[in-house]
Amino acid sequence: MGARSFSQSSDGARLLVRLCAFVFASIAFFGATATANAHASLLRSTPVEGSVVQAAPTEARLGFSEVVTPLVVDLLAPDGSSTRLAARAVGAELAIAWPASTTEGTYLVSWRVVSSDGHPVSGILTFSIGSPSATPPAAPELNDGALRFAMWSARLVLYLGLFFGVGGTFALAWLAGGKHYGIGAIGGLLAAGLVAAPVSFGLQGLDALGAPLNMFGSAMAWQAASATSYGFTAAIAFMALSLALLALAADANLSRWLSLAGIVGVGAALAASGHASAAAPQWLTRPMVFVHGAGIAFWAGALLPLAFAWRQGGESAEAALRRFSTAIPCIVAALMAAGLVLAIVQVETPLALWYTSYGQLLSLKLGLSALLLALAGFNRWRLTKPALAEQVDAQRWLVRNIVVETLLMVAILGLVAGFRFTPPPRVLAVEAAEPAAIHIHTSEAMADVAISPGHAGTVSASIMVMTGDFGPLDARGVTLRLSQPGFAEISAVAHKPGDGTWRIDSLELPEAGTWTVAIDVDISAGRAATLNGEVAIRPATGW
């Protein structure tokens, strides 16, 4: 019997080593290949948003904060007809081939791309050829409420399976000594998670395409989902859930190895995609996500077995509680350290906790986490010893508090599932700091203008002027004029600091939107040129 146990243990150890090697190699691969930023933001476009151009462009350009992969680009013409356009990624830009159309009026370019965190990003570019349409085409709905709810629900069920199911299996194997406390509930959560993983993957494909729920299951949706990094998360999560389900049916020795591999898979699944894992520096953020995910699985997974154990009582319940009480302080310390690092990376400034949707969700999560920690501390230092001393009231309160802890965990996971729909403040800060740029070209002169930062408020401007054939132009003076309906014209004389550009150090732009740009260039005595264009100014960040 001893030889058989040793053999099983050795086989389990080899299985664990292989699984962990695969998981960590995957994490290293993701960290090496993913880009530094995540959740792409549109920074500029040609033609400019809301502008009026005199001739149809040969191609439209969208400039993003990072390299993106095009998914779907549709053109809505002035008559309401829709055409699917071909697009290709050129660095951090999307080059969109324009059809042979000279019809005057307002055009809408509806685009969807996927960023390195696996999340689809969408938007609409609106501009007019010749003159705006009296009745512009109706903009398509980019956010399907039913699809978003389905995605949130699938993510929440998947999280319940990973944290309470896989974590519960680990607790049964390592804390409860192989006892089957709450095994029915844990098995049900694992089964639900195994269903939710492919469902959430399919919904990701619908979101990538901007398709309705009735297209779920179509080959097109699954192909679109495979173009996102979320496919790695869904696959690793499915593997972790499967290992945990096998652990429930395995003997005690193999169950330990399988459940340990499963909890490693939980951390790896979360580190494979998402806002936090794709943030820079990834050598730090991906391991922190791994630690955070695995730690939550340990804590959350222990709750159901402990609650069922204490309902039955006995020495096994006492042993499980002792083991949990010994380990949980270290787990909580690691959780808090990893969570703090990720919050600093994602939020960057405390004001973003109040002024951004992501920050508000994170604030709610932190508030619930504080309640959870307070309750866990009360259980650990005020109820554990009396409960182990068989004080009935302490045991009753301990079970009740564990149930409350479980409900708080579920609420926190519900908030975490909502992070999918909100870009983190660090991404918004990159977008806000990006200059608003415009190139104006005439036969007599041309100019490259950059307004930094490209949002409403106090900005500076940099202007480089050249001849119409890209030659040097030693102008005698440059004046920048900006105008928008409802506001007095803003005019400023630029100075030349000696680096070949003309600069304006301080301008106040009171409002976001499309501003008309006029650049008066004093070329030489009796010779001047005025260059006209439009530039899109983004709203102020608020923090």
Image (spheres, rainbow, N blue to C red):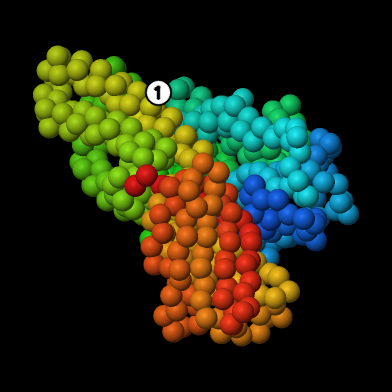
Classify residue 212 by image quadrant: top right
Q: Position of residue 378 (x, y in %)?
A: 16, 29
Rendered position, 169 above or below 185 = below
Classify residue 312 by image quadrant: top left
450 and 494: which is toward the camera: 494
Q: Amino acid at mark 1?
A: Gly
Identified at 41% across, 80% down, the residue is 497
Give the residue furthest to the front: 526
Q: Is residue 52 visible?
A: yes
Q: Which residue is mark 1?
A: 182
41 and 26: which is toward the camera: 41
Rendered position, 140 above or below 275 = above
Identified at 68% across, 45% down, the residue is 126
369 and 536: which is toward the camera: 536
Q: Residues within 10 Å of mark 1 (few under 14, many from 20)?
A: some
Q: Position of residue 386 (x, y in %)?
A: 11, 24
Identified at 63% across, 44% down, the residue is 123
Q: Position of residue 233 (x, y in %)?
A: 55, 46
Q: Position of residue 9 (x, y in %)?
A: 43, 50
Rendered position, 61 above or below 396 = below
Q: Is residue 38 visible?
A: no
Image position of 106 (left or right of 253): right
Identified at 50% across, 52% down, the residue is 489
Give the residue furthest to the right: 100
312 and 330: which is toward the camera: 330
Badge 1 element: loop
